[in-house]
Amino acid sequence: MAETTRQSYIFEHTERIRWVDLDAAGVLNNAVYLTLLEQARFAFFSELGLLEGAQFPFLLGDTHVRFLLPGGAGETVTIRTGVSRVGTKSFEMVYELESERGVLARAEATLVWVDSQLQSIPIPDAARALISPS
């Protein structure tokens, strides 16, 4: 099956940075960025109706984050996301995290569709239709 590609963000999710999200330097801990990506992913796939019992039908295979500005306590972060590529068993998502001060980070993630035994399987046609870039 041919792969499809898109770079635009089609979904937005907002989170507030809590004091517990900060590191010893007083800025958003780098590990929390992955949590913010996951929260946006959860909201996106929930809206699409692709989560069964609040469980992802895929696993994170790879992720890259480019940190641009440090996040701070109390800031509201808007996470924009979209699916940029759909393959046979995996797909890629792109993200942009922005606060009132500007873009904090940009990220990409590769996700692999799995069965109940966590073995990779082809992306089901119904899911493919929902997530494929237009």
Image (tube, rainbow, N blue to C red):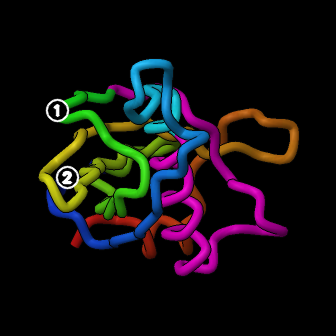
- The segment highlighted magenta reads 35-64
- Which residue is disc 1 drawn over? 68
Nearer to me, 101 or 85:
101
* Label number found at residue 51: none
- Magenta span contains residue 2: no
Q: Is residue 87 above or below residue 43?
A: above
Furthest residue toward top? 24
Q: Position of residue 68 (x, y in %)?
A: 16, 32
Which of labels 2 and 1 is toward the front? 1
The amino acid type found where label 1 is placed reads: Leu
Q: Position of residue 3 (x, y in %)?
A: 28, 48
- Magenta span contains residue 40: yes
Question: Considering the image in quadrants, where does the C terminus appear?
Answer: bottom left
Q: Residue 46, located in which quarter of the rendered image?
A: bottom right
Q: Residue 83, located in which quarter of the rendered image?
A: bottom left
Query: What secondary structure is marked by label 1?
Result: loop
Nearer to me, 34 or 62:
34
Q: Position of residue 11 (x, y in %)?
A: 33, 72
Say whether disc 2 or disc 1 marks the residue closer to the N-terminus: 2
Nearer to me, 100 or 78:
100
Q: Please rate how many residues cluster around mark 1, counting C-alpha atoms within 10 Å: few if below 14, some from 14 to 19, many from 20.
A: few
Query: What secondary structure is marked by label 2?
Result: strand
- Which residue is disc 2 drawn over? 5
Q: Which residue shows up at 48% across the image and 49% down it?
A: 36
Q: Is residue 114 above or below residue 48?
A: above
Q: In whole angstroms, how far apart are the C-alphas of marks 2 and 1?
A: 25 Å
Label 2 close to label 1 by CB (< 8 Å): no
Q: Which residue shows up at 59% across the image and 48% down it?
A: 122
Q: Is residue 116 above or below residue 28?
A: below
The amino acid type found where label 2 is placed reads: Thr
Q: Which residue shows up at 41% across the image and 68% down it?
A: 14
